[in-house]
Image (cartoon, helix red, strand yellow):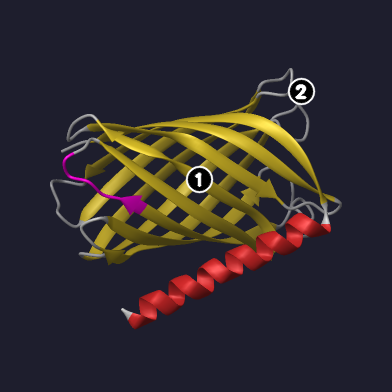
């Protein structure tokens, strides 16, 4: 328990210090966006340990006449090594028009991921998710490596279907080919919202996400409306 508290304290301190420095060192460009997704989760061959998930997400840039921004398709296979520890191996395909609205770019990412429940009480639970992305751009040379650390806090109440939660996720570039930013700290995402559980199969999430993308001369701050549908297959 003491190790968990120290880990979360150091991690949150790193988030705050990094964001404070970048926020005050450069100016911000603000943009409204909308991210919408559907996720399927289910067991593999009725196994209690192995599972899969599939997620399709569409992102829209609401300030631009070319509204479509990018789509992300995720697949992953996961193994519950312990009651509080899950290991996943996944891949993502990103189709984007960020650089040029008239030109589509594609990126593939392979990623191992570890998710562990750091703490749980009757009122809340804290989850840590660590992911390493191996990124390949179909049109550019060089492989990029990016580390992602996410801390999630869920507030629990068995008598209600609506559960508030928030998370913070930091992105760090470990290997930087010419087609990504020169910054080591790539971006930070802070989300606050609610999860609504309709039944054992269907739930959805909605809320606000603040995304800071650290640039060479200016920081981009996206104000994102999130809507996500989660389907759990028994």
Q: Nearer the viewer, residue 134 or 147?
A: 147
Majority secondary structure in the magenta region: loop
Identify the mark at residue 102; answer none if there is no mark. Answer: 2
Give the quadrant of residue 162: top left
Q: Which residues are magenta?
A: 154-159
Circle 1 packing at 10 Å, graded few (<14), some (14-19), many (20+), is many
**Residue 155 painted magenta:** yes
Q: Position of residue 98 (x, y in %)?
A: 72, 34
Q: Is residue 213 left or right of residue 83?
A: right
Residue at screen point 74% across, 37% down? 30
Q: Residue at x 44, y 49 (%)?
A: 166
Q: Is residue 135 left or right of residue 48?
A: right
Secondary structure found at label 1: strand
Q: Is residue 101 left or right of residue 61?
A: right
Report how far apart the C-alphas of labels 1 and 2 lie in the structure: 31 Å
Residue 139's x, y, as percent?
A: 72, 42
Q: Position of residue 133 (x, y in %)?
A: 55, 57
Under circle 2, the secondary element is: loop
Residue furthest to the right in view is 217
Report the residue at 39% width, 47% height from top: 165
Taking depth in this image into account, of 70 and 24 the one nearest to the observer is 24
- Say which of marks 1 and 2 sits in front: 1
Mark identifier at residue 191: 1
User: In the displayed structure, does residue 91 sit left or right of residue 125?
Assistant: right
Residue 2, horizontal then vertical, whole percent: 35, 82
219 in magenta? no
């Amino acid at each position: 328990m003491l190790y968990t508290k120290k880990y979360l304290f150091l991690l949150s301190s790193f988030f705050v210090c990094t964001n404070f420095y970048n926020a005050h060192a450069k100016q911000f460009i603000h943009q409204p966006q909308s991210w919408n997704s559907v996720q399927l989760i289910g067991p593999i061959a009725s196994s209690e340990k192995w599972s899969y998930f599939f997620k399709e997400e569409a992102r829209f840039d609401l300030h631009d006449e070319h509204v479509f921004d990018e789509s992300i398709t995720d697949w992953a296979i996961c193994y519950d090594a312990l009651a509080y520890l899950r290991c996943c191996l996944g891949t993502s395909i990103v189709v984007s028009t960020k650089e040029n609205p008239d030109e589509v770019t594609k990126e593939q990412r392979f990623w191992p991921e570890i998710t562990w429940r750091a703490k749980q009480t009757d009122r809340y639970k804290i989850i840590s998710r660590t992911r390493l992305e191996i990124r390949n751009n179909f049109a550019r040379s060089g492989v990029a490596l990016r580390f992602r650390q996410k801390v999630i806090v869920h507030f629990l109440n068995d008598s209600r279907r609506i559960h508030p939660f928030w998370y913070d996720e930091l992105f760090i570039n470990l290997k930087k080919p010419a087609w990504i930013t020169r910054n080591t700290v790539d971006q930070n995402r802070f989300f606050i919202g609610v999860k609504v559980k309709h039944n054992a199969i269907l739930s959805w999430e909605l809320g606000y996400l603040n995304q800071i993308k650290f640039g060479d001369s200016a920081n981009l701050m996206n104000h994102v409306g999130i809507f996500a549908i989660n389907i759990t297959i028994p």
